[in-house]
Image (tube, rainbow, N blue to C red):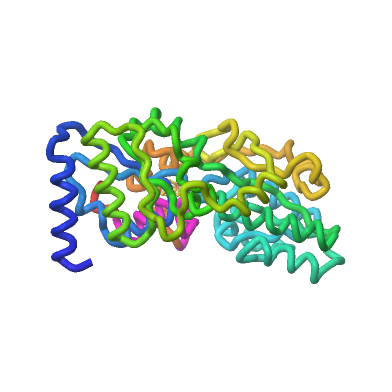
Amino acid sequence: MDLKSANFWRDALAAATASCDTKLRIMEVCGTHTHAIARYDLRSLLPENVTLISGPGCPVCVSGATFIEKIRYLLRQGITVAVFGDLLRIPGANGTLAGEKNLKVVYSPADALAFALANPQLKVVFAAVGFAPTIGAAAALMAELEEKNCENFSLLSDFKEIKPVLSSLCDNCRLSALLLPGHVASVTGVEHFADLPVPGVVSGFDPENILHSLLLLLQAVAEGKKDHLLNNYPQAVSQSGCKGALELIGRYFSLSAGVWRGLGMIPGSGRVLKEEFAHWDASKLYVLDSIQVKENPSCRCGEVISGNATPESCPLFGKMCTPENPAGACMASTEGSCAAAFIYGRGGR
Ligand code: SF4
């Protein structure tokens, strides 16, 4: 961004908060926003009384050590587990999965199914993490699975719904407003985020779009519009979302309690296969629910994810924990807050 644009946004954001004499806390929910904000140093353009807090929108980061250990258990039973590459760097209770046998790195749910179809002699589990866009892709996969009658494929779901955590975060983190995730909203629609207790703006990802969304949020806060909900990413997001994807999700998945690193169990924040599709549910097929492990107490990822600590406040940050040698999920994931803070810095806020 050139100097003229930077000055424009700095002045506009300052003008929007000129009448506010309290400290404002805005959470950017999505990991892609976190990285764009850090990369373009957008914090440096915010008024002094505005703090941007990174939220729980990195899907790999919010999956806990228990999920990693379930995958390890499967691998050691000789079952092939298809994973997104970032998961290989996330520490479980017994280190990362790197070096384990029977892993298959995939880039999409469709890759995982293609691998299973090409290798009928293997039992293949897709270790599924992600929010609405990935759940939609997995639901499409289930439809294909039904058609192709593939018997060697199952799904270990750690899918998450973001909205149920946002209300509790608004209270726990004393948030003033939410920069809402454009990727998730492209599937769910803007309406999905109605009824939050603070103003929200669905945003795209280029720096000017993020700054404009922040401006809209600050204006709404200054005007006391608590139920303000705006779509500032209309090129990708509609009011009611992607009907086909939502129908598919509803056909194959039901809501469940979700377990989030740092936030614990939150009712209605997980997505699991419906009972009638239990024959594709790896947690039932391989009886994985009894595997439960504790998080590494030295890593403060839980507090970072829940907006209660900055990455820099973790004693391991930049010393024992770097992107090359991550000690926790938020540094290991390319969308993690600690990785963003380490790579780009956060302008001290
Ligand atoms: Fe965890 Fe590393 Fe972040 Fe500390 S710096 S919270 S150890 S990921």
Task: From the viewer's perspective, tell me whether residue 183 is left or right of residue 74.
Answer: left
For image coordinates 41% across by 46% down, the residue present is: 180
Does 1 appear above or below 202? below
Task: From the viewer's perspective, tell me whether residue 11 is left or right of residue 255.
Answer: left
In front here: 225 or 80?
Answer: 225
For image coordinates 81% across by 42% down, the residue present is: 276
Residue 99 appears in which quarter of the rendering? bottom right
In front here: 173 or 79?
Answer: 173
For image coordinates 33% across by 47% down, the residue present is: 312
The magenta stretch is 324-345
Question: Residue 329: x, y in percent?
Answer: 50, 50
The outermost residue toward the top is 171
Q: Is residue 328 magenta?
A: yes
Question: Residue 282: x, y in percent?
Answer: 76, 48
Question: Residue 106: x, y in percent?
Answer: 64, 65
Does 156 appear above or below 227? below
Question: Residue 333: x, y in percent?
Answer: 49, 56
